[in-house]
Amino acid sequence: MTDSTKQTKTSSPVFVIMKRELAAYFTSPIAYIVTALFLIFSGFLFFSTFFLQQRAELRGFFAILPILLSFFIPALTMRLFSEEKRSGSLETLLTLPVLEGQVVAGKFLAAFLTSAAMLVPTFFYVITAAQFGTLDAGPVIGGYLGALFLCASYSAIGIFASASTKNQIIAFFIAFTICIVLSLINMFLVLLPPVAVNILSWFLADTHFKSIARGIIDTRDLLYFISLTAIFLGLTVKIEQSDRR
């Protein structure tokens, strides 16, 4: 790859916007506070299993992960569009020679990388469990792979919610509601007929995440997360195109 090609890629609007948003995350307390709270809650769940139930495993951690991410990812993404809409800086950005899709892609990549970074310290749980027990590598790898897909999908939902309003709190609750429904509604499916359960289960992020977390990589699960991410990114682009007009 030539130097000019590298420079073109790193100076493209998508990467410029991504780097700007990453800098905004990590030069402010937002990312650190959200990550710290995430680790406190996830650590409590892991170590309560580890010490109280005396089981060196990560099943409990992965079981509750969709619910935790339903709360913490919207907290990371709520400001991405809504704050700029409120301050008027988004309108300035959109007057530049940049496409709406490039703006959305840049902000999405920043949100995804930041949410994925929250997972890195949790490798300590893997090391701890491996020291005191025998871990099956398949479910651990599958659990983290599924977590990355969750981060991508929930980040897309988060920026869609942020693009829908100028109010960060409203953006948080829109994203949280969508994510928590995708994570928890399966608890209420027992009230429905089996045929309805089979159909609705396909639409639930929790169902597909747990399938991957078992160490079984099914293309249907991958297609679900890719489709969910693409749908909400596409809706966000539509919102920004409408605002630009």
Image (tube, helix red, strand yellow):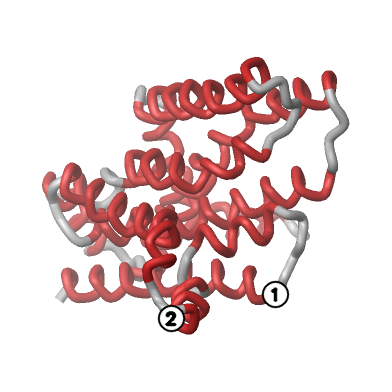
Q: Is residue 176 left or right of residue 101?
A: left
For mark 1, does the 10 Å Cα neighbourhood hold few (<14), some (14 to 19), or many (20 or more) residues?
few
Residue 17 shows in the view: yes
Picture coordinates of residue 212, whole percent (x, y): 68, 59
Which of the image's four quarters has the N terminus?
bottom right
Residue 26, image quadrant? top left
Dot 1 corresponds to which residue? Answer: 219
Residue 106 appears in the picture as rendered: no
* Amino acid type assigned to the residue bearing label 1 in the image: Thr
Q: Distance from label 1 to label 2 (Cα)?
A: 22 Å
- Secondary element under disc 2, as helix, strand or loop, is helix
Number of the label disc, if any, that sits on residue 196 = 2
| Mark 1 or 2: the one toward you | 2
Which image quadrant: the C terminus?
A: bottom left
Q: Which residue is situated farthest in the top direction here?
A: 51
Residue 142, given in percent of the width and then of the height, sits at 73, 52
Q: Residues within 10 Å of mark 2 (few under 14, many from 20)?
A: few
Q: Which mark is residue 239?
A: none
Q: Nearer the viewer, residue 238 or 139?
A: 139
Residue occupying the point 41% across, 51% down: 17
In which quadrant of the rendered view does residue 235 lie? Answer: bottom left
Task: Determine the residue positioned at 61% across, 42% down.
Answer: 62
Q: With 218 as the anchor, is 41 left or right in this view?
A: left
Q: Are marks 1 and 2 in contact (CB under 8 Å)?
A: no
Where's residue 67, x and y in %? 44, 45
Q: Is residue 128 left or right of residue 155?
A: right
Nearer to me, 98 or 72:
72
